Amino acid sequence: MAGLATGFWKDRNELEQKRSVLAEYAPRMQEEERAVYKKNWHEAVRRALSSA
């Protein structure tokens, strides 16, 4: 989007023509496992903030 603001691309159509997808990623982790990691991450952040 910055390229549009600076005039690098003349309009959205030009930008969309240049765009290409090199790879797509999809999550493979089960929701339950992800929830455990997220809970542990939140706990680590809480501890880090409380010790600062």
Image (tube, helix red, strand yellow):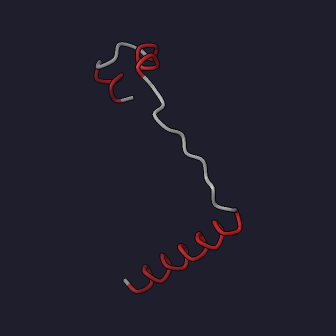
Q: Examine the rendered structure and indicate whether residue 42 appears above or below residue 25.
A: below
Q: Examine the rendered structure and indicate whether residue 52 appears above or below residue 22.
A: below
Q: Examine the rendered structure and indicate whether residue 44 appears above or below residue 31.
A: below
Tell whether 24 sits left or right of 50.
Answer: right
Q: Position of residue 41 (x, y in %)?
A: 53, 73
Q: Nearer the viewer, residue 28 or 15?
A: 28
Q: Residue furthest bottom?
A: 51
Q: Residue at x 45, y 84 (%)?
A: 50
Q: Residue at x 39, y 29 (%)?
A: 1
Q: Nearer the viewer, residue 41 or 33?
A: 33
Name the quadrant containing residue 10.
top left
Q: Examine the rendered structure and indicate whether residue 46 appears above or below residue 14.
A: below
Q: Position of residue 4 (x, y in %)?
A: 36, 22
Q: Residue at x 59, y 69 (%)?
A: 38
Q: Nearer the viewer, residue 40 or 49?
A: 40
Q: Position of residue 32 (x, y in %)?
A: 71, 68
Q: Nearer the viewer, residue 11 or 32?
A: 32
- What quarter of the picture does the C terminus occupy? bottom left
Tell whether 26 sits left or right of 15.
Answer: right
Tell whether 27 sits left or right of 10.
Answer: right
Q: How many marks?
A: 0
Name the quadrant containing residue 20.
top left
Q: Residue at x 55, y 73 (%)?
A: 42
